[in-house]
Image (tube, rainbow, N blue to C red):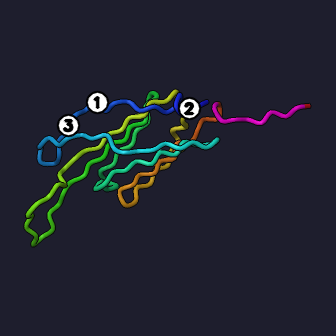
Amino acid sequence: MSLFQTLVPSFARNTSSQNGSGNHVPTKKPVYEIKETPETYGVTIYLPGATKDTVELTSDNGEFRVFARRSWQQPEGWTSVYRESNDAAYELVLTHDNAIDAEKIVAELRDGVLRVSLPKTEAVKPRKIPVS
């Protein structure tokens, strides 16, 4: 089963999200890549500024969804002269044909990079068939 047929991107449903103060922040589709082995799909998602407590992962009804927030915090004693970094939200939705074993998904966020292992269900893993 080809990766393209199994995991495909879907557009984010929200165009903005609320931050803690009730202000709307833009929702962006993060940069990501998908790799495949016979056992698993590996998804690397770039979420600069996001922290573990702001990342939400869900897998339900053929959708794997990633939502994360980043908040810009001005260091104490600093005065901004110019900045391009703002509050933002990230959302990525990948649809699949239920070829993912949701109970075995593993995710790790380090330095703004989220690495997710999406193990394949036994039904879609390649098998070597003995010949007698």
Left or right: where does residue 90 sit relative to residue 44?
A: left
- Which element is circle 3 on? strand
Q: Which residues are magenta?
A: 124-131
Whole-angstrom CA distance, mark 3 to mark 2, is 30 Å
User: Which residue is painted at 11% across and 48% down in the image?
Assistant: 21
Quarter-wise, where is residue 27 in the image? top left
- Callout 3–callout 2 Cβ contact below 8 Å: no
List the residue tagged with mark 1. Answer: 13
List the residue tagged with mark 3. Answer: 16
Left or right: where does residue 2 sit relative to residue 94?
A: right
Identified by mark 2, the residue type is Ala
List the residue tagged with mark 2. Answer: 99
Q: Which mark is residue 34?
A: none
Whole-angstrom CA distance, mark 2 to mark 1, is 23 Å
First reached walking from the N terminus: tag 3 or tag 2: 3
Above or below, comparing residue 52 to residue 127 in the picture: below
Left or right: where does residue 80 sit relative to residue 45?
A: left
User: Which residue is painted at 52% across and 27% down in the image?
Assistant: 97
Instruction: Count all numbered tags in the image, as a single digit.
Output: 3
Above or below, comparing residue 116 to residue 12 in the picture: below
The secondary structure that most of the magenta stretch takes on is: loop
Identified by mark 1, the residue type is Arg
